[in-house]
Each structure stands twice: as C-alpha cells, then as structure tokens.
Amino acid sequence: MSNLSNCPIIKVCGMRDADNIRAVEQLLAAQPNSMMGFIFWPSSKRYVSERPAYLPTRCKRVGVLVDEDIERVKRIATDYALDYIQLHGHESPDYLRALRSPSSIRHHPSNIIKAFPIATAADLTQTATYEGLADLFLFDTKATLPGGSGQQFDWSVLAAYTGNTPFLLSGGIGPDDAERIRAFQHPRCAGIDLNSRFELAPALKDIAALHRFLAQLQFVP
C-alpha cells in the first residue's frame, strides 16, 4: 500500500472495555501513529455511555460523533482529552470551522477527521468543500447507518480522489484482507481503520485476530 509501509496510521475504533483497551494499546505500542476510537453516538452498539475505567495514553484518542450539538462535542472533547474529533454525519464545512475556533474547546484538539460514505466515484466530489478544514478524511462504506456496517465498498473508485487531504481507508476491513491492503495503492492513503470485523462482540476486539492481521502486514512483530 502506498506510503503505509513506513509509519502507517492504524486506527482501531469502537472501543469501550478497559481491559480490551489496554490489550489493543499494548498491541499497537510499536506503531507511533496508532489511534483508538470511542463512539459517542447513542444509536451505535459501541456507544460509550460512561467513561471507561482506563483510557489509552500511548494511542491517540479519537471521539466519533454524528451530527452532534456542537456544545456536546466541546464537552466530550474536554472530558476525554481527545486528540481527534471524527465527524461521521452530515456536518457542514461551517461546522468544522466552528470546531477549529481556538476558543471553541478548552482542551482544544488540533485534529479533525471527516468521514464520507462512499459507493461510487461520484461520492468523492463532496470532499472538495472540506479541503483545508479536516486533517484527515475517512472513506467508509455507504450504508443506512453511519459506520460499523462490516461491509466493503469498491476501493478502486478511490482512484478518482485527487484531493490534497490524506485519508484513512475504512469500511469492513477484516482478518482476510491483508493481501488487498498490500495491493491497494493511493498517494494520499495514510492508514487503515479497523472495527466490527475484528470483534468478539460489539466494542470487544479480538486481540488474536488483530495481531495476526497486523503481523501479516508487518506492522507488529
């Protein structure tokens, strides 16, 4: 995969259980750009309704929100000391500008990830108005509900993406996809996002499966 062989971003999303958080953090300890995602959308099966007993210190913390009231975003970003805010709904460019305001959040995360549902190359046109407002895009499978569908889209359509913002590849990546990941090429691809297909149950990751997969990609020993 282009530009992922040296220092890829590995994001494991949908975390909630303290012991599982520790185990994933240990697995990703050798990855300097690792991230862990916490979903604050109440309709998700992985919804974080209360603060876990442990939060990562060696992985960047990402808070996933969907069309949320901006005041609640501020509170969550502060309470969880988020490094990234991931916007997974229909948030407008003006919404992102408001989040970037220096006075917006007490613990101000300098990084924003904007997710886009993708099915065809035409869906990539929506990214243009967000250039310069997000640090990363995330390309996920277009589905009825945001995120965690376990379904993949046709990655070949991403050849039509010519923007400047780097992106994370998401959408149903599973334990059998190491070869596809290695074969995928795009100059703006910065990393991968892993979630539902590496679970024993919602919000409980299968550490052995994650380890095997990342070892196949030579991202862990």
Image (cartoon, rainbow, N blue to C red):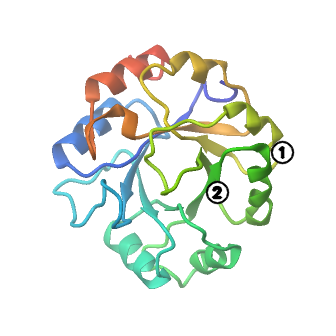
Residue 192 position within the rendered picture, expressed as x and y whole percent measured from the top left: 54, 36
Q: Is residue 91 left or right of residue 49?
A: right
**Displayed quadrant of residue 75:** bottom left
Please tell me whether mark 1 sits on a helix, a strand or a loop.
Answer: loop
The residue tagged 1 is: 162
Of badges 2 and 1, nearer the viewer stands 1
Check the image and report above or below for 66 versus 30.
below
Residue 58 position within the rendered picture, expressed as x and y whole percent measured from the top left: 35, 45
User: Which amino acid lies under the numbered mark 1 shown in the image of this protein?
Assistant: Thr
Alpha carbon of mark 2 to alpha carbon of mark 1: how far? 15 Å
The residue tagged 2 is: 135
Decide which of 15, 125 is in the foreground and name it: 125
Mark before the other along the chain sequence, 2 or 1: 2
Residue 12 position within the rendered picture, expressed as x and y whole percent measured from the top left: 40, 41
Q: Quadrant of the C terminus?
A: top left
**Camera sees residue 164:** no
Q: Quadrant of the N terminus?
A: top right
Residue 68 position within the rendered picture, expressed as x and y whole percent measured from the top left: 47, 75
Q: Is residue 89 left or right of residue 32?
A: right
Check the image and report above or below for 40 versus 182.
below
